[in-house]
């Protein structure tokens, strides 16, 4: 198998082995370094990334199943190390393990010298709607709380977004009015005209729901669980129990909250780092 640099001129058959945005960046001559692994005229693998803050961040790494366990991935990584020596302190890679084949990535990264980093609470947790609804702390009880986003105008949602930004609270990348936000499931709780808590669910992850904004500033520690119960009850009416639910934790406190509310949820995002030797 042969390894070569990828550019806009020879991207061709390697396009399907790269993430779409990486292929687009190569086409537009953006500062992306990419390698292609081939056997004859067949594209067998690709590795790409970019320099940021003194580190090379691997954005796309893939070897076609037929060509795995033949040393091609190791050779691409060794070639990348050779290219980057003197330009970066090392390499990093972050990914969410959402499919069975991702398990082989752990073994590969450790075999080529990467070390797993502490996540410091910045993690994505995965469960299903049915399992979430079975959590003792989220079992439906008491009256529903909160107002659904479906009952709010875009103007009110924009005001909620500004308030969330001012509080540095988590929310969807596209904002509260993003078309992917499920307005039936997403809820906000106000008291005396001030936002106390909200739960935002979006459908940005194909085939599942992402709780992309779970936040409370209330002194009432029961408010957020009650709001989550209400949101889950609404989701259960709309989606099947096997629907995948992803929850983003942003620090150790939010990770502890996720783990207490959703004990069945498992972390699926990981970060690995490789240091260049001097």
Image (cartoon, helix red, strand yellow):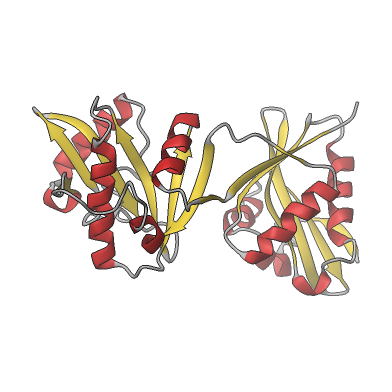
Looking at the image, which residue sits at the far left?
Answer: 192
> For the point 75% across and 69% down, which residue is it?
64
Q: Residue furthest front?
A: 136
The answer to whether residue 176 is seen in the rendering is no
Q: Does 235 appear above or below 255? A: below
Does residue 243 appear to the left or right of 223 in the view shown? right
| Closer to the camera in the image, 110 or 10 | 110
Q: Is residue 203 left or right of residue 49?
A: left
The quadrant in which residue 156 appears is: top left
Please provide percent x and percent y for residue 111.
85, 50
Residue drawn 46% across and 57% down?
127
User: Would you say residue 244 is visible in this rendering?
Assistant: yes
Residue 228 higher or lower than 163, as above or below? below
Rendering coords of residue 34 (x, y %): 75, 51
Q: Residue at 80% across / 54% down in the picture?
A: 108
Question: Horizontal placement of 271 versus 120: left or right?
Answer: right
Position in image of residue 194 (x %, y %)? 15, 28
User: Residue 81 sits in which quadrant?
Assistant: top right
**Relative to 82, 185 lies left or right:** left
Q: Along the line of sight, which residue is nearer the eye, 34 or 183?
A: 183
For the C terminus, the quadrant is: top right
At 83% across and 62% down in the image, what residue appears? Answer: 37
Closer-to-camera residue (10/160) = 160
Position of residue 55 measured from the top left corner of the image (x, y, whole percent): 72, 32
Q: In the image, is residue 160 above or below residue 203? A: above
């Amino acid at each position: 198998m042969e390894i070569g640099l990828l550019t806009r001129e020879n991207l061709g058959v390697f396009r399907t082995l790269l993430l779409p945005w990486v292929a687009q960046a190569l086409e537009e001559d953006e500062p992306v370094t990419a390698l292609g692994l081939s056997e004859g005229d067949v594209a067998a693998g690709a590795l790409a990334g970019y320099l940021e803050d003194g580190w090379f961040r691997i954005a796309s790494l893939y070897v076609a199943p037929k060509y795995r366990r033949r040393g091609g991935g190791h050779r691409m990584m060794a070639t990348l190390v050779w290219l980057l020596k003197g330009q970066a302190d090392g390499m990093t890679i972050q990914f969410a393990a959402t499919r069975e084949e991702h398990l082989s990535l752990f073994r590969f990264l450790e075999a080529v010298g990467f070390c797993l980093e502490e996540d410091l609470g910045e993690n994505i947790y995965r469960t299903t709607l049915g399992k979430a609804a079975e959590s003792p702390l989220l079992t439906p009880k008491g009256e529903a709380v909160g107002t659904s986003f479906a009952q709010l105008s875009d103007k009110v949602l924009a005001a909620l977004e500004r308030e969330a930004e001012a509080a540095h609270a988590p929310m969807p990348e596209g904002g509260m009015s993003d078309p992917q936000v499920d307005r039936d499931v997403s809820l906000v709780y106000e008291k005396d005209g001030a936002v106390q808590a909200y739960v935002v669910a979006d459908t940005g992850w194909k085939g599942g729901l992402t709780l992309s904004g779970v936040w409370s500033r209330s002194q009432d520690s029961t408010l957020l669980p009650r709001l989550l119960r209400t949101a889950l009850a609404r989701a259960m009416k709309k989606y099947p129990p096997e629907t995948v639910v992803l929850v983003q934790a942003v620090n150790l406190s939010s990770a502890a909250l996720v783990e207490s509310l959703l004990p069945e949820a498992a972390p699926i995002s990981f970060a690995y780092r490789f240091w260049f030797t001097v």
